[in-house]
Image (cartoon, rainbow, N blue to C red):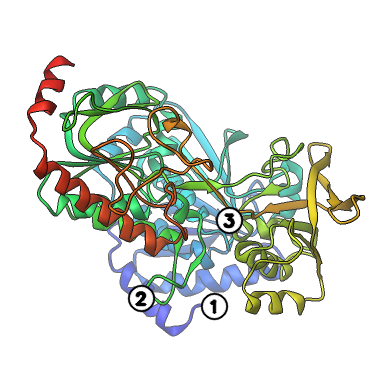
Amino acid sequence: MLDAGIKEQLKAYMEKLQQPIELVAAYDDSSKSQELKQLLDEIEPMSDKISLRTEDSADVRRPSFAINRVGSDIGVRFAAIPMGHEFTSLVLALLQVGGHPPKVSQEVIEQVKDLDGEFEFETYFSLSCQNCPDVVQALNLMSVLNPRIKHTAIDGALFQDEVEQREVMAVPSVYMNGKPFGQGRMTLEQIIAKVDTGAEAREAEKLKHKDPFEVLVIGGGPAGSAAAIYAARKGISTGIAAERFGGQVADTMGIENLISVPYTEGPKLVAAMEQHVKEYDVDIMNLQRAEKLIPASSRGGLHEVSLANGASLKARTLILSTGARWRQLGVPGEEEYRNKGVAYCPHCDGPLFKGKRVAVVGGGNSGVEAAIDLAGIVGHVTLLEFAAELKADEVLQKKLRSLKNVEILTSAQTTEVVGENGKVSGLNYKDRNSSEEHHVALEGVFIQIGLIPNTEWLKGSIELSQHGEIIVDERGETSIPGIFAAGDATTVPYKQIVISMGDGSKAALSAFDFLIRNSADDSESDEKAA
């Protein structure tokens, strides 16, 4: 099951166990149970603090296994063979149940311990989903820190009947006490905030008392991270406020064009960026959504950003790096069937459509790559492109055309997503050459038509292009002195991670140059007036 190298690494990790743990396995007669048994039989001898027994109860999923701390109520359960992206979740669960301290702040630990109530969480995931481990690991940790919290991580492909019954069509999908709790990537802090209803108000009160920053970065993607690092290296007070640290990169699978890094994955890059930012004196304010920009009344004065929780932050210079999000089709049925057959992440949700018929809308690189990936999982893929020709690289087109279960439709304008019984049943499109209407029967629609900038909150306060992008000059400065912008939210062409990082660095250097050329007197006057 595990190769020799992984076994040696895992055995080294198991030396860090501080308390005895018990693996409690529930098998059936399936081949997957045999795989699980092989995995657990290989883990059990890796430490004298690990024991293994089989589960007698009929009330548990099979195959599954629990990791319990001996002599306590602390434990987690996997209804899965946690390999692929979830192997790290398995390793962390073994360590944390075994008493190895988690790498989170003491403040977060105390917040989890203080949660009042009984919480039974279930997370449906897929082994190919790069966003799922964040959710699985967060809920596992919560169940380790607080015995009133229980968590079971369920491989949707392994328990297809449950997936069908609960109509799970997007992962990760989380249930709390039997009811839907959330879908999509969620961090530990986001989950805690959703459970702890008073957290937002407490956080807002803390933010209100922060002193003005010299540089405040809004957005935590590649551009924002680079900007924060470059600003902090200048020794000036720097803050970064992000709705979700990592932004769109966290939803990206393979990254092969980041110079000097032949291959990485979005979540790994996000973790590395966050760790790099933490190496410097940067005030990181996560889960903060900006809602309004109030520019300074004078050059060198204080700019203000109002947040969704009611607090506001002030700074002498701002760097706006709010990134972009998936562009929607804007057709009837799209929103109604979102996560009920309409999806945006083929890597995450593809396994839930095994053997089924799906469509991919979009003929650029992302759309064609999605169709190629899905073709190896689903029964049939129909790719629809609005233009007369596909726009993807020729090498991708050649691969796509070689696949027997793929149909390519060009000059096809998607007009409606249709459904029955609360989930997608088909898609309507118009042939742009003949104007004829057509219907395609299917169970899933994956939309891959590009990005739209997250700049709605800036309308009326700063100059935007007709596409909603922040207009910047060669220094990254916007139409307002002292406010800079970088990354996918700007008019800079070619939305690439490496370009965003460079532009974020440039914006920070420009902000520093602005600060040393403009007196802080106006800023101090503004602050007193406020």
SS at mark 2 in the image: helix
Instruction: Kindly identify which residue carries mark 3.
Output: 55
Q: Is residue 130 left or right of residue 297?
A: right
Q: Is residue 64 above or below residue 118?
A: below
Most foreground residue, 142 or 469: 469
Instruction: Kindly identify which residue carries mark 2.
Output: 9
> Where does the image place residue 230, in percent across and percent down from the top left?
20, 55
Instruction: Kindly identify which residue carries mark 1.
Output: 1
Which amino acid lies under the numbered mark 2 shown in the image of this protein? Gln
In this view, the mark in front (1 or 3): 1
Which residue lies at the image location 83% right of the left edge and 41% below the top edge?
Answer: 418
Q: Is residue 15 visible?
A: yes
Most foreground residue, 346 or 498: 498
SS at mark 3 in the image: loop
State which tag comes first along the sequence, 1 or 3: 1
State which tag comes first along the sequence, 2 or 1: 1
> Where does the image place residue 208, in percent across and percent down from the top left?
24, 23
SS at mark 1 in the image: loop
**Pointers 2 and 3 in contact (C-beta within 8 Å):** no
Q: Is residue 321 left or right of residue 278?
A: right
Q: Is residue 425 left or right of residue 36?
A: right
Q: Residue furthest bottom?
A: 4
Q: Is residue 93 left or right of residue 316?
A: right
**Pointers 2 and 1 in contact (C-beta within 8 Å):** no
